[in-house]
Amino acid sequence: MQRYSKVLGKNKREMVMLKGFPCKWGRCTFCDYIEDNSKNEKEIISFNKEVLKNVTGEFKVLDVINSGSIFELPDESLKDIREIIISKGIEKLFVECHWIYKERLDEMREFFGIEIIFRCGVETFDNDFRMKFLNKGAGFKEYTEVNKYFDSICLLVGIKGQTKEMIERDIEILENHFKLGCVNVYVENTTSLKRDEELIKWFAEKYAYLKDNERIEVLFHNTDLGVGSED
């Protein structure tokens, strides 16, 4: 599996996919990414050290993802990332963080000592769909609660059960109330949730203009950023 890539489109950066401990939430109905984790701390640390060796600092920006939140990486891996930041002159760090860690973001800012963009997977601002159908475990009611903590969010589109109206509202909120964002088109996996091909076709046509928006990345496959593929 590819664990390192250079993202050469929007927000040029190096990206690493590390291993972490099991996702603390780990109950989203659409996600099987949580299988990419471990409880063996020594193995995780050793594995991550090898992946981090790829980082060159070429763009001065590093994006770290794992099957959960940045808070679920071992302390030793966090120290290794910090060493890379210092040695390679990294100036900005992208990380992913579940809503449950929203009150702890300053811990990471103080630890790394550079600008951090925290991405939060909200998936949708339709509260019933997010909490009851997707079982996301993020119990906010309004987008204002989210952008109080997070500058960047991830949305999910194309699941059977979603509606055009839900997606239109989600994209409007992203475009107008967040600095950065990513829209993930749902790809079927080992879970029982299914793609809505007609909805995805509609989304691709209606929101084709997003390709020119430097603040928003649209991923039609979960390996579009170069990590996660088997090649």
Image (tube, rainbow, N blue to C red):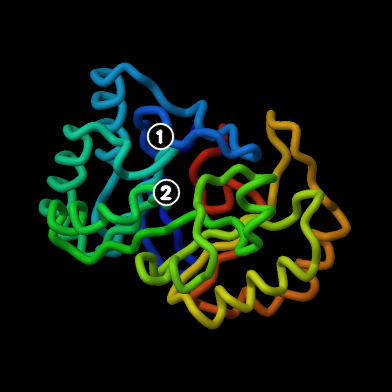
Do tag 2 and tag 1 residues touch (Cβ < 8 Å)? yes
* Cα–Cα span, label 2 and label 1: 9 Å
Q: Quadrant of residue 66?
A: top left
- From this viewpoint, is residue 219 visible? no
Task: Please tell me which residue is depicted at 42% across the width and 52% down the height of the picture.
Answer: 99
Number of marks in picture: 2
Q: Quadrant of residue 74?
A: top left
| Whole-percent x, y for residue 16 in the image | 37, 44
- In the displayed structure, 91 sits above or below 83; it is below
Residue extending furthest toward the bottom: 176
Q: Is residue 83 left or right of residue 94?
A: left
Q: Secondary structure at mark 2?
A: loop
Q: Quadrant of the C terminus?
A: top right
Disc sitting over residue 98 in the figure: 2
Task: Please tell me which residue is depicted at 22% across the width and 35% down the height of the picture.
Answer: 77
Say which label, 2 or 1, has the lower sequence index: 1
Disc sitting over residue 24 in the figure: 1
- From this viewpoint, is residue 75 visible? yes
Q: Residues within 10 Å of mark 2 (few under 14, many from 20)?
A: many
Q: Quadrant of residue 65?
A: top left
Task: Please tell me which residue is depicted at 83% across the width and 60% down the height of the picture.
Answer: 199
Task: Please tell me which residue is depicted at 88% across the width and 58% down the height of the picture.
Answer: 198
| Whole-percent x, y for residue 59 in the image | 30, 64
Q: Is residue 62 left or right of residue 221?
A: left
At label 1, the amino acid type is Lys
Q: Secondary structure at mark 1?
A: loop
Q: Residues within 10 Å of mark 1 (few under 14, many from 20)?
A: some
